[in-house]
Image (spheres, helix red, strand yellow):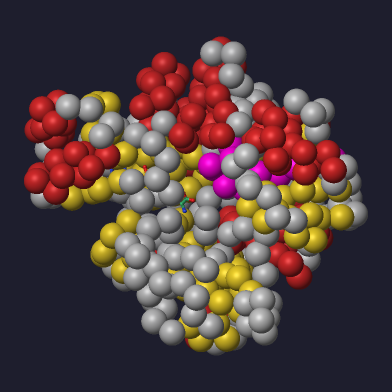
Amino acid sequence: MRVLLLGGGGREHALALRLVEDPSVEQLIAAPGNPGIAAVAELRAVEAADPAAVAALAVEEQADLVVIGPEAPLVAGVADAVRAKGIAVFGPSAEAARLEGSKAFAKDVMTAAGVPTARAHACTETEDVGLALDEFGPPFVVKNDGLAAGKGVVVTDDRAAALGHARECGRVVVEEYLAGPEVSLFVVTDGEAAVPLLPAQDFKRAGDGDTGPNTGGMGAYAPLPWAPPGLVDEVMRDVVHPTLAEMRRRGTPFAGLLYVGLAITAAGPRVIEFNARFGDPETQVVLALLETPLAGLLHAAATGTLAEHPPLRWRDGAAVTVVVAAEGYPAKPRTGDVIAGAERPGVIHAGTTRRDADGALLSAGGRVLCGTATGPDLAAARDAAYDLVRGIELAGSHHRSDIAAAAIDDRIAVP
Ligand code: AMP
Ligand code: GLY
């Protein structure tokens, strides 16, 4: 099949590497792609969040399957426009993508479906925000209602800072703090059948020891040696299937990738957020361990035949990815710096571009590269990932030095 992959970040580079390995893929086209993806795909320019432009490109390229990486095109209705041309697309409709696009909508669906999550209030008035903060008490959690690339959330003990964030956002969701380690679980679904991938853990804060501001994610690892047995089955039963049923009941079935962000609390798993697409950088580690051909799996989800898909196969061992971020990320990333050492296998391109004049590789985003490695166990995978990171030269860049460390040292406790 001919596959068109939309997006140009680290997640899409990881998807591209797996898609081209699938024997059923005769041609991979990526739009806009990035210099890393260019090694395995033909690149096309496109405005990824423009439904008509993407649909036209899919027709022109005679795509048999379109895989949508980022959330913005989904929320803009790109999947609907491609589907309207009769082309299979992996990614939910705009209506279903509201599970990510609006925190208030996601809460409403979870309430209707009886899904365990933090108690929350959607507010616009400062006065209501204050009342909600006082009801739940510190630490305060204030979330921008709209899309914010993982950076719209403030978790703080400082009530004034919580109020300040709410004022900046306008419409927010204020919610109860969930204490416990976080898990990202990706579920491939055609709206009815649902197949979980390996659970992974992301590192949201910019600095070691979970300090500093929230980011899109600074690293990840899988599998999770500390996860309670039965976790995935429990989440499928209590979260995923009820949510998919509620979406069907509303006439807006969710087909694509349901990303379940969880906190494993003393009372059990609680949903922190839903996303409507693969997570970044968790995808880099989850797909590094997937043995089942990826295009066939995504095509089954896109065509309503997931129930007939054979069970997934996984490699033994573990995977770790470490993000190398630009100076100033997440607040104000500096771009345009020359990068060296990105040629090794396992170096995933997240925010890079090529200079026209001499073809030099330049930084072009906040998260620039990810060192991604597998190994027989987490410690070996971690060593190999940091080895890749040490080989990367990018002026002013920063990365966390503690990705997967607590899991390896058995320091993660489920309350
Ligand atoms: P979100 O964009 O909703 O995933 O939030 C980003 C990050 O903020 C999460 O990964 C958590 O680390 C943190 N967070 C969000 N909601 C809560 C909550 N209710 N309790 C504790 N931490 C939270
Ligand atoms: N790494 C978190 C996300 O993709 O939203």
Most foreground residue, 160 or 296: 160
Question: Residue, x 44% and y 21% (percent of image)?
Answer: 109
Residue lying farthest front?
A: 357
Which contiguous range is marked in magenta? 64-74
Question: Residue, x 79% and y 54% (percent of image)?
Answer: 29
- Is residue 334 visible in the rendered image? The answer is yes
> Percent from the top left, x then y, of residue 199?
53, 50
Q: Is residue 206 left or right of residue 252?
A: left
Residue 67 lies in the magenta-colored region? yes
Q: Quadrant of residue 42?
A: bottom right
Q: Quadrant of residue 51?
A: top right
- Is residue 334 shown above or below 86? below
- Is residue 211 shown above or below 110? below
Q: Quadrant of residue 49?
A: top right
Residue 118 lies in the magenta-colored region? no
> Percent from the top left, x then y, of residue 385?
54, 76
